[in-house]
Every structure is written in C-alpha cells, then in structure tokens.
Amino acid sequence: MTDAIRPIELLGAAIGEGAPDRRTRAGPASLRRWGLGARLSARGRAVRWGAVVGSDLALMPQGPMAVVGEFSVR
C-alpha cells in the first residue's frame, strides 16, 4: 500500500499538564475545528477521527507529573 492511498486515523491527546501552557489540552479540538481532517481529505487521503484521550484531572493534587505518568501508560 502506498502512502497516497494509506488511510489516516487521527487520534487526540488532550493533555496540558506538564506543558508550559496547559491550553495545549485543547489541541485535538482545535485541529478538528480548523479542518485538519478536511484538508488531508482534500489531498486525496482517507481520514477518520479516532478517539480523543484525556488526562485524569483527579490526579492533580499529586502534581502534574502524576497526571502525565498515568496518561503515558494508557
């Protein structure tokens, strides 16, 4: 299968803990809103939006690295 016909599945990682700017958590929604899938489709690619995985904010009392650590193993 060549790259030109290989389907693309877009997966979102909604996590901002551990980043200098926690608004990065909104990245998956922003990419969808700005039409990333449509732009790739317009170039002839089969695109599907998959799951968006979010961080467990209940772990924040333990610190941002606890949130990142738990997120990373999923």
Image (cartoon, rainbow, N blue to C red):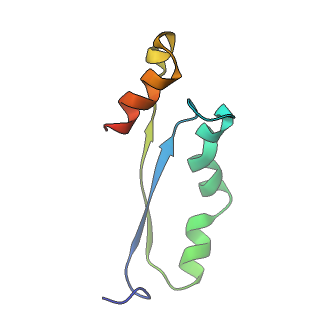
Quadrant of residue 67 in the image?
A: top left
Quarter occupied by the C terminus: top left
Q: Nearer the viewer, residue 20 or 57?
A: 20
Q: Is residue 56 above or below residue 44?
A: above
User: Residue at the location (60% across, 65% down)?
Assistant: 36
User: Could you tell me if residue 7 is visible in this image?
Assistant: yes
- Total numbered labels placed on residues in the image: 0
The x, y position of residue 68, in whole percent, is 45, 31
User: Residue at the location (44% across, 88% down)?
Assistant: 4
Hey, which residue is sitting farthest top in the picture? 61
Q: Nearer the viewer, residue 18 or 11?
A: 18
The x, y position of residue 1, in whole percent, is 30, 88
Q: Is residue 65 above or below residue 44?
A: above
User: Could you tell me if residue 56 is visible in this image?
Assistant: no
User: Residue at the location (58% across, 34% down)?
Assistant: 16
The x, y position of residue 70, in whole percent, is 36, 28
The x, y position of residue 15, in whole percent, is 53, 36
User: Residue at the location (48% across, 25% down)?
Assistant: 65
